[in-house]
Image: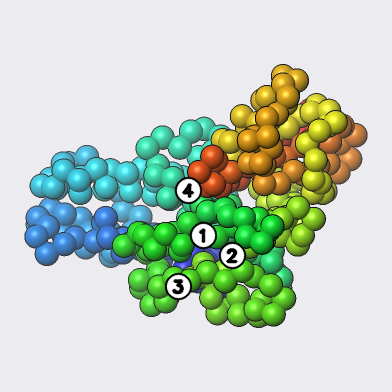
Amino acid sequence: MKDFWVSCGHHLLDRDEAGALVVTEEFLKAYLARPELSPPPEACAGERALHAALLAAPRRPISDRQIAAIADRDARENWALMREFRDRLMAQRTVEAAYLDLIRNGAGATPPLFINQLVHAILRNVLDGCEDPFVLRAAELFFRPQRMTVHGGSLIAADEETVAGTSPQPLSPLVAMLGVPVPGEADVLNEDNAPSYWERSDRFDMALDLTAGRRGLAALGEVIERWIAHLGSRRAQVEPFSEASNVELTWYIGLDAEATAIGDALWKGEELGQSARDRIVGLYRLVLDRSGGAPIYLILAMTKDRMLRMKPQNLITGLPVAQLEAAS
């Protein structure tokens, strides 16, 4: 079986009888390797002692007193955020349950970066055994912002961090620990270079063609189906289509903030201007098995500056309760 996304830390997690991810001490230790938590040479004795204690016992309680004893203010804030996030992870039976708790009950001060890392790990579990690089590359939209561009009449999504050449720190603490190569220039994924995805998957340096009617949007639809099945325990059929006009939006889900605004306008019966139409990246019809209800429409869109920031949590929190009950 081909491996991919080693940097998400899935090798450090266990799985329960239902196939969900279970937090381990090894997984918690990976967060202690982050630059924000690894004590620099000038760190005070209190910070070094706390870090060492958690390396020895990652689940041990962290008291307010221990955090207050850290001299550096930024370090205190980082440790407080880490404690809240770690405790929420440990309070749930699985990583999936912790993610659902965060999106349903409020993330609090949890950094979006940490939530994206959970999505990354969960999707690695969801897609375990997948042999299609197009599906895997489409799944990257769930947890990594994309820069959109039109090239030769095609709409191309490239990893924002890769094309910008920014971020001196890796998104995952395991990238540095495992020696994953630094991202280089992006190539557009196609049939010829698809086999190279496996060795490049942690570099996020392959772009994806999201032009209507092509393989990228269909692959994203497959990821959406698997995501809902795993986290929502519902089978869904997701079909891409290309035109927003003459659609009766009985229910819609914006897959990002821009798409939600477009959906709101359509819901109110407003005519979309050309600028808004040009920002639509993908449209889908979603039908929950056995629900008997009208299709749910999914909208994916980019911002005016051509950024795509997908919110996969909307696929869970945005589903209509009545249809979920009917599909049970």
Is disc 1 in contact with disc 4, using a CB cutoff of under 8 Å?
no
Q: Between disc 1 and disc 3, whose residue precedes?
A: 1
Q: Nearer the viewer, residue 12 or 244?
A: 244
In this view, 99 is above or below 54: above
What residue sits 80% from the left and 40% below the top?
A: 243
**Tag 4 residue:** 115
Disc 1/disc 4 C-alpha distance (Å): 18 Å
Distance from label 2 to label 4 (Cα)?
23 Å
Secondary element under disc 1, as helix, strand or loop, is: strand
- Whole-percent x and y of residue 31? 36, 59
Rendered location of residue 235, percent (x, y): 80, 48
Of residues 135 and 98, the one drawn nearer to the viewer in this rendering = 135
Q: Earlier in the sequence, mark 1 or mark 2?
A: 1
Identity of the amino acid at label 2? Ala
Q: Residue furthest front?
A: 152
> Mark 4: which amino acid?
Ile
Q: Which residue is mark 2?
A: 207
Q: Secondary structure at mark 2?
A: strand
* Marks 1, 4: nearer the viewer: 1
Residue closest to the eye, 171 or 68: 171
Q: Secondary structure at mark 3?
A: loop
Q: Which residue is mark 1?
A: 159
Q: Mark 3 sits on what residue? A: 184
* Quarter of the C terminus within the rendering: top right
